[in-house]
Amino acid sequence: MKRLLKITLVLAISLIAFGTYAQDATHAVGSIHKFKVNVDASNVHLADHVGNTYTWAVYQNDGTTPAVSGTDYSFTTTGAGVDANTVNIQWLQAETYFVEVTEANLAGACTTLRRLEILVSAGALDLAVIASDNAGAVITGGALTDCNSGSGATIDNATNDFGSTTRYFTVSMDTDGQPWTTGAWGFDFTTSAASTVTSSAGGTVTGSSVIVASGTSQVVLTVVTANTPGVSPANDISLNMVASNAFITTGAGNTNEPGTNLTNNTSESFVITASPETSVIAID
């Protein structure tokens, strides 16, 4: 009994010395967050801390092993020095981390350490596809149904070419509720009708895949499909887009969108209404 009591006391003292931490926040791979100390409501550095020196550090989930800069995380602003009481951290890999700051007084002889625990998850990666106009504004409801682009146009009396119709789909990527702009990202797609797909600036379409350059959080895809004249609604075209295999690219490699976030990967459908299939004009 005495030995058990001794072991229990040692464990309790160890936990107190190291600190017991509850998870303080959950962030997403790829997201950037500002960590700060000694600021007022206006984010102004408090006067009695001006001139003090700060050192920020990130540790792995054991609380002692330094996390790897460029693989686990990246400081996107200065994380050390005089008056460096804030730091921006981008998370690059899913894991539990400890963020720690050491503040030294003007003389540098006395310090205070603070730390908190962050769970970094891939679960907040979220790609969304919407039916839109060519500027990326969402289109909903009755506005999704319209005549084909050949409606009212003069058809060559020597051929049976009824032209094509252009519609647009906007695809965006978020991490942790923030637009993803700090690395490339991409996805595969399918359309519900045979189409030719091209992209606005920032995205490159290769076959049925799109790669979007770093710095761009959304891309507008132009979809052109051949008109199908005839009786409506039997010959109307229902056109939507479904994205799959979405990912972001960080310094640690690619991270895929989790399966729990796929509900908005399918757009609403445009309905392209057919025009009558008028025959060529014959002369008796």
Image: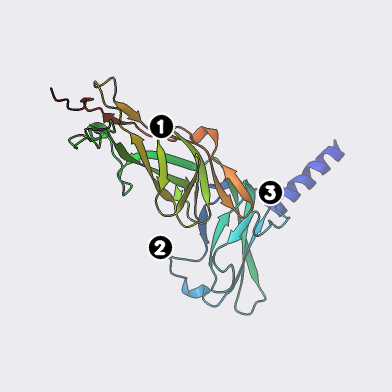
Residue 41: image tag: 2
| Residue at 74% over, 46% down | 12
| SS type, badge 1 | loop
Q: Secondary structure at mark 2?
A: loop
Q: Farthest left residue?
A: 284
Residue 116's x, y, as percent?
Answer: 60, 53
At label 2, which amino acid type do we have?
Answer: Ala
Badge nearest the viewer, 1 or 2: 1
Disc nearest the viewer among 3 and 2: 3
Q: Position of residue 112 (x, y in %)?
A: 63, 66
- The picture places residue 271, in percent across and down from the top left corner, at 29, 30
Residue type for callout 1:
Ala
Q: Of the numbered discs in the image, which one, if any, rests on residue 194?
A: 1
In the rendered image, which residue does mark 3 sit on? Answer: 61
Please name whichever residue, 250 or 283, is drawn nearer the observer in this view of the structure: 283
Against 207, is 278 above or below? above
Q: Are marks 3 and 2 in contact (CB under 8 Å)?
A: no
**Is disc 2 surrounded by few (<14), some (14 to 19) or many (20+) residues within 10 Å?**
few
Q: Amino acid at mark 3?
A: Asn
The quarter of the picture where the N terminus appears is: top right
Disc sitting over residue 39 in the figure: none
Towards the viewer: 199 or 150? 150
In the rendered structure, the answer to whether residue 71 lies left or right of residue 240 reads right
Q: Residues within 10 Å of mark 3 (few under 14, many from 20)?
A: some
Is residue 29 visible in this depiction of the protein? Answer: no
Residue 135: x, y in percent?
A: 31, 49
